[in-house]
Amino acid sequence: MKRRSFLKGTLATGAAAIAVNAGLLTPSTVLAADWNKKAFDAKTTDDALTSVYGSAGATASADVKLKAPAIAENGAVTPVEVDASGITGVESISILASKNPQPMVCEYTFGAAGVGFVSTRIKMGQTMNVVAVVKAGGKLLKAEQEVKVTIGGCGG
Amino acid sequence: MAIQIRMRGKAENGVAEVKALIKHPMESGLRMNQKTGTPYPALYINMVSIKVNGVEAITSQWSGAVSTNPYMAVKVKANAGDEVVVSMTDNAGDTGTETIKV
């Protein structure tokens, strides 16, 4: 048994090393430099927000309009809409799912021609809060809503 | 293989809503293959850029928690006839670009 697992181990690492040498892995690592890996790997919403904005202290605001279903029959396609067009100077919008293994779902950064509105569909493993965080004028604003996920329920 | 994007956009009072449907498996890397017990390798779109007349309007970073075959709707400042380009890259290096006139 031991010999077998040892062989398996060496073979696997050997293959990975060959892949790196052949340059097979380089394209993805180069691209990942731009991508905020730390934020997306974070295990809690606070950690994720700190990696993106340098602070997790967002204040709840009614100007951040978060639209998500109260009950999602299929958590794999939960429609989420964040409308922050009522706020001036929106710099960024993030959507997080609080209990996902990696809560950070997506982050949008707005240039001069962008309007603070985002709509997408996200995956959710279980019932949890969807959090929308908006950065505008140096301030962090957020809106939160619970979404019940009923996988395996009626029609599941 | 290029990522397939279907796009639609309409300008109204200087603001255009751009909707895109993207064909992509968006594999998070957490889903297990029940037969072998090993996870499916992660494969998802991580960078998205939206340009209006060649100027960057919105850049976005995604994780594998965005749904399979993602839907995206955003609003940009654009007038009728302006050119909106959406381009994206996944973590395997595949890219996709689509251009429309709103």
Image: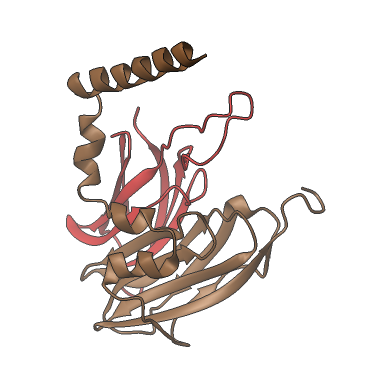
View extreme (front): residue: A2
Q: Position of residue B71 (x, y in %)?
A: 48, 52
Q: Quadrant of the C terminus of chain B?
A: bottom left
Q: Residue furthest right?
A: A154
Q: Residue at left 61%, top 72%?
A: A146
Q: Quadrant of residue B80?
A: bottom left
Q: In this view of the protein, which residue sits in the foreground, A132 or B33?
A: B33
Residue A151 visible within the image: yes
A12 to B97, vertically: above or below: above
Residue sitting at x 43%, y 79%: A142
A95 shown above or below A17: below
Q: Is residue B41 left or right of residue B87?
A: right
Colour of chain A in the image: brown
Q: Which residue is at a point 45% across and 38% down the rendered structure image?
A: B24
Image: B59 above or below B2: below
Q: Say which colour chain B has.
A: red
Q: Position of residue A35 (x, y in %)?
A: 26, 51
Examine the rendered structure and indicate whether residue A130 appears above or below residue B28. below
Of the pair A32 and B52, the residue shown nearer to us:
A32
Q: How is the image coloured?
A: by chain
Residue at horizontal 25 percent and vertical 21 percent from the top: A17
Estimate the x, y position of residue A64 in percent, counting from the top left.
44, 81
Apparent side of residue B22 relative to residue B87 in the rendered image (left or right): right
Split into 4 quadrants, where in the image is the N terminus of chain B? Answer: top left
